[in-house]
Each structure stands twice: as C-alpha cells, then as structure tokens.
Image: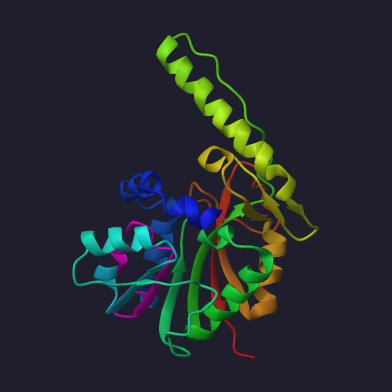
Amino acid sequence: MNKKKYESKSVVSAYINMRLQNPEVMIIVKYREFISGKHVLDIGCGSGRTTAILKNLSSGYVGLDYSLEMVESCRKRFEGVSFLHSDVRDLSEFKDGEFDCVMFSFNGLDSINHDDRLKGLREIRRVLKKEGLFVFSSHNRNHRFAISRPGIEILTTPCKQAGNIIKFLKSMRNHLRNKNQQVFKDQYAIINDVAHNYAMLTYYIDKVNQIKQLEDVGFETIDMYDTLGNMLFQDSDDKDSAWIYYVAKKLIH
C-alpha cells in the first residue's frame, strides 16, 4: 500500500520541491566529521531532497529508494551520481562496514511493519563502520494529533469548499478501508494517519521505546531533536512534535 503511494507521479512531484528541515541542517553541521569526505548512504532519498548537500560533502555518496519512480527522478536531476532501486530490508549489495554515515530521512523507516523495521535496522548497522553514524526520523506516538480521523474545514469560497468536500470524501473512503489494519502495541503503533488523505499505514513510536529498540539491535542514541530543531531528552515534552530526529552510533559488542 505505502510503496504504491510513493511511486505515484503526484507524490514524486511533490517531493522534488521539498527542502532540508531545521533538525537535518543542525545534525549535518554538528556531525559533519562523519559526512565530509566520507562514504554516505542516503536511504529513502526520494526525489533528491537530501542529495544536493550530501553528495557535495561526501566522497562516496549513494542514494537509495524502494520507489523506482523516485530513483528515476533522482537520476534525471543528478547526472553521474549513484542511485539504486533497493530496499532497506536487504542491503546485500553493500559490504559489511562500507559506510561512515547512513541517513534515512523523512520518516522513511515508518513505511514498513515492525518485523521488517528491525530487519532494516540490523542491515543498516551491518553496513556501517565501527562507531558509524545513523541519522533518521520517526513518527512520534506522543504527538497530540497522532490519532485522528478525517474532518472538513468550512470555507466561504465555493470553489475551495468544493475541493475540501472532495478531499474529505476521499479521506473518509481511505480511512474506512484502512482503519481495521491499524496495530496498537505497548512498544509501538501502526496508525492510519492523515498523510496522503489517510491512504497509508504509518509506524509510530515514542522516544523511550525507540531508544530501547535501537539499543536492542546494537545502536546507542546520542541525540534527539523535535521538528523545530530543539534538542530533546527522554523526559522532554514532545507533544507538539509530529516526528523526532534521532542520531545514533553503531555499538561494537
């Protein structure tokens, strides 16, 4: 379901115009030593939102996405740059310890189920060098609007109101179709949220459980940020942050 949505031309076009978010800029500046002149794997590169800066800083940039449409878009925009159509759950095309830094931006890890998420995290750890850096974002289960249902805004402009009604009907249809596939566990939830008119199922997790999840697969969480770029701690109030940025380092057992 999620993969089909990310391969649609409308979504690919929308992602082309997106820019780096504040926490991403802060992380790239703070941890530049892991990127500048180093080997970087950019998972979920989409239409190249993160490519421009990472390819210029690194000495060995590889962009990867499981949407072929996204990969083709990148290849057209960035000639001579390495892009692969692949899947985080199977990074067998890469050697153990091949990268200094792996970035999985814009909540890309949240598009797969729990077991596949753990499989992906283990693959990311495998391809990272000793004490290599892993940067990613994930939807925040503590967000005040994590669970929602379609609604409609009343506007005075007839044309805009007609568009709102169409969007509401589309969202309601998608939500009715997908809500029974939601999963709610103590450690995480898979929620049919507002994204793309309720067309998808998205993984949500809180800070404490994400830190534990990373630890279980061999990472140490060293930084967390909200969507505005504020640094977070385990006891920080994060209800206004729809997702959280994590910076983790590969542990050697």
Left or right: 42 as drawn, with respect to 208? left
Magenta stretch encompasses residue 77: no
Q: Position of residue 35 (x, y in %)?
A: 36, 74
Residue 71 drawn above or below residue 196 = below
Q: Position of residue 165 (x, y in %)?
A: 53, 20
Q: Position of residue 174 (x, y in %)?
A: 60, 38
**Front-most of residues 147 and 24:** 147
Whether residue 207 appears in this view of the structure is yes
- At a point 48% along the width and 90% down the height, the residue shown is 96
Magenta highlight range:
35-54
**Front-most of residues 164 and 147:** 164
Left or right: 89 as drawn, with respect to 93? right
Residue 6 drawn above or below residue 30 = above
- At a point 41% along the width and 49% down the height, the residue shown is 8
Quarter of the view holding residue 59: bottom left
- Furthest toward the right, the residue is 186
Quarter of the picture holding the C terminus: bottom right
Whether residue 144 appears in this view of the structure is no
Q: Position of residue 228 (x, y in %)?
A: 49, 46
Quarter of the view holding residue 151: top right
Question: How many numbered badges does the structure rendering display?
Answer: 0
Left or right: 25 as drawn, with respect to 137? left
**Front-most of residues 123 and 137:** 123
Residue 14 drawn above or below residue 91 = above
- At a point 56% along the width and 43% down the height, the residue shown is 199
Residue 134 drawn above or below residue 182 = below
